[in-house]
Amino acid sequence: MTSKKVKAGDFAPNIQVVNADGETIELSSLWSDKPVVLAFLRHFG
């Protein structure tokens, strides 16, 4: 699997993510209507 680094100013790739309800969704289904904010949380424990 190859991956491309995303740089500041790049468009986000259309990936599948799991929302807070446990449903898998594509990012493109969200950003067609409104801006999308991605938060990456780290767990130390």
Image (spheres, rainbow, N blue to C red):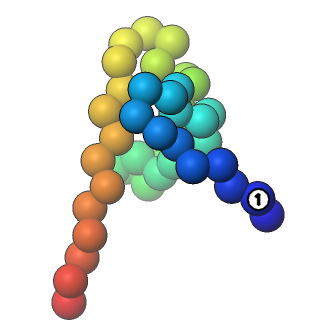
Q: Secondary structure at mark 1?
A: loop
Count of numbered labels shown in the rendering: 1
User: Image point 40% across, 34% down: which residue?
Assistant: 8
How many other residues sit within 10 Å of disc 1, few (<14), some (14-19) or many (≥20)? Answer: few
Kindly indicate the quadrant of the structure image that contains residue 37: top left
The residue sitting at the bottom extreme is 45
- Image quadrant in which you'd find residue 33: top left
* Residue 20 visible within the image: yes
> Where's residue 23, x and y in %?
49, 48
Residue tagged 1: 2
Residue found 52% across the figure and 42% down from its top = 6
* In-image side of 23 versus 14 (left or right): left
Give me the residue at 52% from left, 26% from top.
11
Q: Is residue 22 above or below residue 27?
A: below
Depth check: 45 or 2 in front? 2
Residue 7 picture location, percent across and down: 47, 39
Q: Is residue 28 above or below residue 16?
A: above
Q: Residue furthest left?
A: 45
Q: Is residue 45 left or right of residue 23?
A: left
**From the viewer's perspective, is residue 2 above or below residue 10?**
below
Residue 2: x %, y % from top left: 76, 59
For the N terminus, give its image quadrant.
Answer: bottom right
Q: Is residue 38 left or right of residue 5?
A: left
Q: Amino acid at mark 1?
A: Thr
Evaluate whether residue 16 shows in this view: no
Quadrant showing the C terminus? bottom left
Q: Residue furthest right?
A: 1
Q: Against 22, is 44 above or below?
A: below
